[in-house]
Image: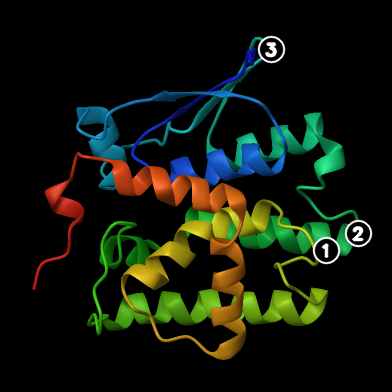
Amino acid sequence: MATTVLTITSKNYGAWALRGWLMARLAGLEFTEKVIPPGDPAMKAEMLLLASSMLVPTLEHEGIKVWDTLAIGEYLNEIRPEAQLLPADPKARAHCRAICGEMHSGFASLRSALPMNIKAHYPAYKIWSRAQADIERVLQIWHECLSAHGGPYLFGGKPCLADAMYAPVVTRFLTYDVALDAACTAYCQRIMELPAMQEWVAAARLEQDDIDELDAEF
């Protein structure tokens, strides 16, 4: 029986929850989920980017409590080095940490203009200029990584922390019908084909609760 607990919120809307959950899955860590309803005021504030600090996901493992997605990723890399969540090569590892940090602290316009909503689909969605600049930066990162490390994932043949950090962006691109070139389309498809992603998406589609503020209007 798993003694590890991962606290998450909505699988439809919870981008940070997805990142932490996917990292734990990629690490091969057995855990039970503690799900906080998306209607909970604190969780709703986090998903609407109104909270002063992000406390979900939180990982509790062998008496250690870790929150903040980057901290969870680094912790998982320490306890499960065989999963290779960070590249072995120092140069690639530094690059991986840099783009994870960039996603962690940046892309505010993308987050606000294209909130994660797996159940929705908005063809020909109009994207405002600041969000488009964030999208272009994401695609630049993906191209650089795929070119430098040969794909099919950002740092080679296995998904790692960087892929988990950018996985919610993949879902956003699909939800909002973002135009992508062949290489980025293939990368998105590869991420969505991960068994863990398919498990997450299936659960997201079964959720009953909707958050009106995160549903796009026309």
Type of amino acid at the residue the image marks with label 2:
Asp
Q: How many marks?
A: 3
* Percent position of residue 185, x then y: 54, 80
Q: Is residue 147 visible?
A: yes
Residue at the outermost bottom position: 181
Numbered disc in front, either 3 or 2: 3
Label 1 neighbour load within 10 Å: few <14, some 14-19, many 20+: some
Which residue is at a point 61% across and 56% down the rendered structure image?
Answer: 194
On residue 62, which mark appears?
Answer: 3
Mark 1 and 2 residues: CB-CB less than 8 Å, in contact?
yes
On residue 148, which mark appears?
Answer: none
On residue 89, which mark appears?
Answer: 2
Which residue is label 1 attached to?
92
Which residue is at a point 77% across and 58% down the rendered structure image?
Answer: 158
**Observer-nearest residue: 37 or 16?**
37
Judging from the image, what secondary structure is the residue with disc 1 in? Answer: helix
Relative to 134, residue 23 above or below: above
Report the side of 52 relative to 89 (left or right). left
Residue at the outermost top position: 63
Report the side of 1 relative to 138 (left or right). right
Numbered disc in front, either 3 or 1: 3
User: First in sequence: mark 3 or mark 2?
Assistant: 3
